Amino acid sequence: MTLHESREKASGDNVIRSRDAELRQRARQVIPGGMYGHLNMSAMPAEYPQFFESARGARVTDVDGREFVDLMCSWGPVILGHHHPEVDEAFNRQMALGDCLNGPSPRMVELAERLVGVVSHADWAMFQKNGTDATTLCVTIARAATGRRKVLVAKGAYHGAAPWCTPVESGTTPEDRANLVRYTYNDLESVRAVLSDDVAAIMVSPFRHDAGYDQEFVDPEFARGLRMICDEIGAALILDDVRCGFRLHFGGSWDPLGVEPDLSAWSKAIANGYPLAAVLGNDKYRAAVQSIFTTGSFWFASASMAASLATLDVLERDDAVGHMTRMGDALRAGIQEQAERRGVEIVQTGPSQMPFLSFVGDVDWSIASQFAAAALRHGLYLHPRHNWFISAALTDADLDRALSATDAAFGELRSPRL
């Protein structure tokens, strides 16, 4: 029985419904649209579950008991694997002492010190809860420091869900994004073409990872050029490391390039799934931070900070980036061999730790959706239009199961060529 068949199977006058289907029906009564945001599965193939029950290591289990190898890692936050024992122990130990208190615990100072010691451009740290919090705060700091309004961002880039940057304009006003100016990623001339004396900041991702499109590594000359432009015009260079942070490098994602931003935004993997975000910056912007008012009721909660400290320790000790790279390389090699053997034209882009698979000629992602649905039926959870994530918990057995699922999925494609 397929996932779709088990979700709702008619038998005479009786209808056997899965728990997922029941929860979707209940959700539609009390949650607008039944679900919202990036976790809304309404546009995904019918086989995809909306609700999950549990997870451990590199496996997730939905509410109907189906287990999958996880190549989405909760869309990035889970970097060491679900329920990593050292991280969970640190979180629970701090929870036993206190979490949301009248003031922060010592964990806040300890984590700020740790991040400043790990990330080369950082002289200070501030904490929030979500990536949108962090990117928005970076923009606010840049404007406070420069007295200017304009922020340059790459066309198609995602920097959060606030009105100033959300990709969906419903509910926003033209004024919300009046000071947002677009350039083309990896094209310095396009940046120079939109410069003005009112530019407060240039925001950039470590590499181009627009949803639905092949990923593009940063050209080191482009990165260095942005740094030079910001120095020339007195604007802040902001690196949005929310998605990539600690997956590409143990430190800032551009540290290996020798290019240091003024401000950087972090979230997702910073605490292995516990809610936390951070803004890191250099001393040039310290006074600007002190001139603004920014806060949140839960921004100073201690347990997630304890989890982040443990996450950083494990990432460094176990060379998690190296392991994720090796496993990602092996996954890619296996997928490439399968595609060639079956005569399917594919493109694999992005870093091995955050791979993306597309099909030649698949302009509407219909083949990718077929592939993803088939892989799911064979025990692998991935996404047809978004980059995947490799976790440090992925084992050889997980990899074998994943490649077995992708091989079966290639075999079930109805239209491998367009």
Image (cartoon, grey):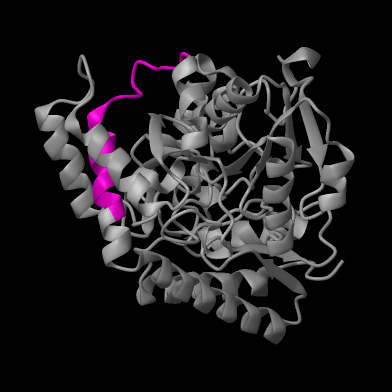
Q: Is residue 417 rendered magenta in the image?
A: no
Residue 337 versus residue 174 in the image, above or below: below
Q: Is residue 296 rendered magenta in the image?
A: yes
Residue 277, image x, y percentages: 42, 35
Tell me, yes or no, if residue 36 can be seen here. Answer: no
Magenta residues, as a range?
293-312
The answer to which image quadrant residue 280 occupies is top left
Residue 79, image x, y percentages: 39, 55
Tell me, yes or no, if residue 230 can be seen here. Answer: yes
Instruction: Work out whether residue 183 or residue 287 is closer to the camera in this orientation and state it.
Output: 287
Relative to 97, 371 lies left or right: right
Residue 246, image x, y percentages: 44, 55
Residue appearing at x 15%, y 35% in the figure = 94
The answer to which image quadrant residue 59 occupies is bottom left
From the image, which quarter does the C terminus lie in? Answer: bottom right
**Number of marks in the image?**
0
Residue 33, image x, y percentages: 60, 22
Instruction: Work out whether residue 300 or residue 7 is closer to the camera in this orientation and state it.
Output: 300
Residue 116 versus residue 321 in the image, above or below: above
Residue appearing at x 36%, y 75% in the figure = 397
Residue appearing at x 31%, y 62% in the figure = 316
The answer to which image quadrant residue 294 occupies is top left
Relative to 17, 362 lies left or right: right
Relative to 304, 407 lies left or right: right
